[in-house]
Image (cartoon, grey):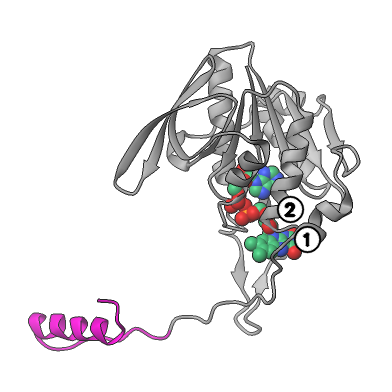
Amino acid sequence: MKILVCVKQVPDTNEVKIDPVKGTLIRDGVPSILNPDDANALEAALTYKDENPDTKVAVITMGPPQATYMLRECLAMGADEAYLLSDRAFGGADTCATSTTIAAGIRKVENVDVIFAGRQAIDGDTAQVGPQVAQRLGLPVVTYVQDIKLEEGKAIVHRQMEDGYEVIEVQTPCLLTAVKELNEPRYMSIGGIVNAYKKEITVWNHEDVELDPKDCGLNASPTQVFRSFTPAPKGKGEMLEGTVSEMAVNVLNKLREKHYI
Ligand SMILES: Cc1cc2nc3c(=O)[nH]c(=O)nc-3n(C[C@H](O)[C@H](O)[C@H](O)COP(=O)(O)OP(=O)(O)OC[C@H]3O[C@@H](n4cnc5c(N)ncnc54)[C@H](O)[C@@H]3O)c2cc1C
């Protein structure tokens, strides 16, 4: 079996701070990390490989050349192959153009049985790329996968719902998006880190994946970010006074005033 995992390098949003004077984001010194949900997706693939050693696990990303560091991390965790889609023509992509490019890259990787993605990236935060890639490849997709059993020709997954889960059987090839409840991602091993530097990373540009520049990046993005800004900090909280029942009535009235209830 061959499992391909879509991985994204993202800024560690826990480390992003806001400049109190200018009100802008401080990005300097913010480390780049493997997107957390993608680490769960990779772990699911590697767990299957542990139990079925003839499995090949590949990772693919679209990003700038620096994304090779994250790909090496994936190789050090145990992935066998890594693909980097990197080209100026891919820049400025919204989710629509991103998924076009990733799907074009996946078409070049042969004999893939299962494609994994994370549910969501912590920077763009849209959760759109996985389902869009599946749609472009004409594959079934199951999102929010919190448990999985892979068998020959099919996957049986638990799809997370707000109040429980659905059990879904889906034929392979298919695309699955992972949530953090799926597993606990492993750390890189020392041997894995050494081996990761011996493995080659395949880099593809738009010609390699047979995409015209007009069909990728900003040129193929139906949406554009018009303005971005730091949200205004919340005002000071209001302390209520009175007896417990007076405060409860007060809270109810305030919620009604704002049409929350
Ligand atoms: C309206 C809009 C305009 C944008 N304009 C720009 C822009 O001008 N310039 C710019 O740099 N970005 C731009 N972006 C951000 C860019 O679209 C996203 O970074 C990218 O499309 C991924 O979307 P996401 O981060 O929401 O991923 P999600 O959809 O939340 O990611 C889900 C999963 O898809 C996979 N995935 C996502 N991205 C990648 C990737 N690059 N490689 C491999 N796998 C991936 C991962 O498995 C991830 O866990 C824009 C986004 C929007 C919504």
Type of amino acid at the residue the image marks with label 2: Ala
Q: Residue at x 73, y 34 (%)?
A: 106
Circle 2: is it few (<14), some (14-19), or many (20+) Cα within 10 Å?
many
Give SS at disc 1.
loop
Q: Position of residue 116 (x, y in %)?
A: 59, 34
**Residue lying farthest to the front in this orientation:** 138
Residue 247 magenta-drawn?
A: yes
Horizontal side of residue 205 vs 127, given as left or right:
right
Q: Is mark 1 within 8 Å of ligand 1?
A: yes
Q: Residue at x 42, y 85 (%)?
A: 235
Q: Are marks 1 and 2 in contact (CB under 8 Å)?
A: yes
Specify the segment rendered in magenta.
235-261
Q: Position of residue 195 (x, y in %)?
A: 76, 23
Q: For residue 165, which quarter of the picture? A: top left
Q: Is mark 2 within 8 Å of ligand 1?
A: yes
- Report the side of 80 relative to 19 (left or right): right
Q: Amino acid at mark 1?
A: Gly
Residue behind mark 2:
97
Point out the residue furthest to the right here. 207
In the picture provided, is 36 more to the left or to the right than 228? left
Badge 1 is on which residue?
92
Q: Residue at x 72, y 23 (%)?
A: 80
Q: Quadrant of the C terminus?
A: bottom left
Question: How far separated are the C-alphas under marks 1 and 2?
Answer: 9 Å
Q: Nearer the viewer, residue 92 or 169?
A: 169
Q: Quadrant of the N terminus?
A: top right
